[in-house]
Image (cartoon, rainbow, N blue to C red):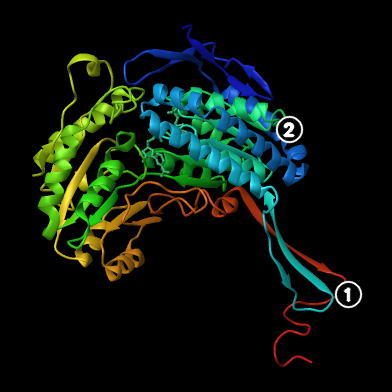
Amino acid sequence: MATMHLRNHIDGRWVEGSSGEAFEDTDPANGEVIATVTRSTTADVDRAVDAARRACEAWRLTPAPKRGEILYRAGEILLRRKDDLAREMTREMGKVLAEARGDVQEGIDMTYYMAGEGRRQFGDVVPAELPNKWAMSMRHPHGVVAAITPWNFPLAIPTWKIMPALVLGNTVVFKPASYTPLLAVRLVEVLEEAGLPKGVLNLVLGPGGEIGDHLVTHPGVDLVSFTGSSDAGAHISEIAGRLLKRVSCELGGKNAIVVMDDAEVDLSIEGIVWSAFGTSGQRCTAASRVIAHRGVANDVIDKLVGRAKKMRMGHGLEPTTDLGPVVSKQAQEKVASYMPVAEKEGATIAAGGRIPTEGALAKGFFHEPTVLVDVKPNMRVAQEEIFGPVVAVLEVGSLEEAVKVLNSTKYGLSCSIYTRNVNNAFRFMRDAETGLVYVNAGTIGAEIQLPFGGMKTTGNGHREAGRAALDVYADWKSIYVDFSGRLQKAQMDGGGTTSS
Ligand code: NDP
């Protein structure tokens, strides 16, 4: 099969980046080259932002229901291509096929949901305090949105940003992760086929470290929406903040599953295995900690270790594979580097802990599913985001202690509790300092119609998905219409209980 070549999409045309250079998009399970990818420079960023700026006015003035119809058509195309997209995703970033299909489905769900916003985008109409006066609010797009996305959800996360941005009347410059340019190209193709006018969505491929700062600080960009590492998020917030740009960040997590002594342990094991090892632990919502009550901790550890040891690593397209590779050599080395760290701090590797070196697995970036025990809350493996198939088990003696351990990291994305006690469940829901809370389910599985995002350093206060996303991608405009024909002074004329 001939290797594909992926290019930028600027002002409605597929074009080479101006460096004249290319980089490779490879399969992390076996190192095969999937595509060559144009390497953009800051000049390409300028072109993309200029195109987005030029398209702004006409797109803003396109009736929102019409914008929504284009999204709806995009949803139909995504649905038709779901299987092909999922297969390409598995090859490009390694997650097993069933999960890749879930990623595409999440993109479809978001696209349909935001298509519906074409006919909603509700504002308020409220009574004015003065006679013959009208008071209402409406949303107003920011202008040009820079959408910078990671590789772990190469279709879903771009749709979380691009679909609300578009339906609200913004134009977009899309900078996907360099590990997943193919799925980014596919998404742009879908929106182009759905009838998006030229310049409304522009794609720039290339290293974030080289072109990212230029995009973020570009005077033509009004809002930066970023999902990725905490380091990059802090950097982007700093340089964009100095320019008083709007910035929305979704960053890391150190999510935990609490298993109480009254829990259904076998059910909790299902949730832990799925949440800790799904997508090889590379979900921002992955469970990287299990906080087990001492009454069930041994049982939880025995069963979890048993399951981890039985997991089959392999290419995500093979139906027998439970665990695909991590995304890159760098990611593999990062995961492996935590094993000596864990042991030095007194933790024990109860399952996994190795990079497989035999057979076909040696060609890819695999890491064994790993269970760490004897972990204490202040250890690095209990505090830092490893972003791989590694779960640390901590033991506690009460719900209060479980919540304290849960909340002891700087992150606040997702958590869950397994319990059959309704009082435990409600106390936990009240006290968890995370943006997502699950009861008797794992830490993953967010649905697109509710807000998604985290507390503390997981983000900067914004939410993606649901109605909450609309607040990120548009400003509020409050409008007062006075049809009294005279000067009326709010808070002075007719206001309060003593006025005449
Ligand atoms: P990175 O932060 O390195 O990359 C994310 C995106 O940012 C990529 O498109 C990358 O480009 C780009 N980028 C990197 N540096 C800059 C810069 N200086 N300016 C602008 N853009 C830049 O993270 P990863 O992709 O490696 O993702 C893993 C991390 O992301 C994990 O820590 C994980 O927790 C977090 N994450 C959080 C999620 C959440 O919703 N909270 C969801 C998914 C991941 P390039 O690829 O070219 O380097």
What residue sits 87% from the left and 71% below the top? Answer: 483
Mark 2: secondary structure: helix
Mark 1: secondary structure: loop
Task: Determine which quarter of the picture holds residue 188.
Answer: top right
Q: Amino acid at mark 1?
A: Ser
Task: Determine which quarter of the picture holds residue 199.
Answer: top right
Residue 155 image point, x, y percent: 49, 33
Q: Which residue is mark 1?
A: 484
Task: State the CA–CA distance, disc 1 to disc 2.
Answer: 40 Å
Question: As rendered, which of 494 and 445 lies closer to the eye?
Answer: 445
Q: Amino acid at mark 2?
A: Arg
Examine the rendered structure and indicate whether residue 201 appears above or below residue 32.
below
Residue 400 image point, x, y percent: 22, 67
Rendered-image quadrant of the C terminus: bottom right
Task: Determine which quarter of the picture holds residue 496.
Answer: bottom right
What residue sits 28% from the left and 58% below the top? Answer: 417
Q: Residue furthest top?
A: 2
Q: Which residue is mark 2?
A: 54
Label 1 crowd bin: few (<14), some (14–19), many (20+), radius 10 Å: few
Question: As rendered, which of 327 and 442 lies closer to the eye?
Answer: 442
Question: As rendered, which of 289 and 272 lies closer to the eye?
Answer: 272
Residue 57 image point, x, y percent: 76, 39
Q: Earlier in the sequence, mark 1 or mark 2?
A: 2
Query: Is residue 40 found left or right of 437 in the rendered image?
Result: right
Residue 425 image point, x, y percent: 31, 65
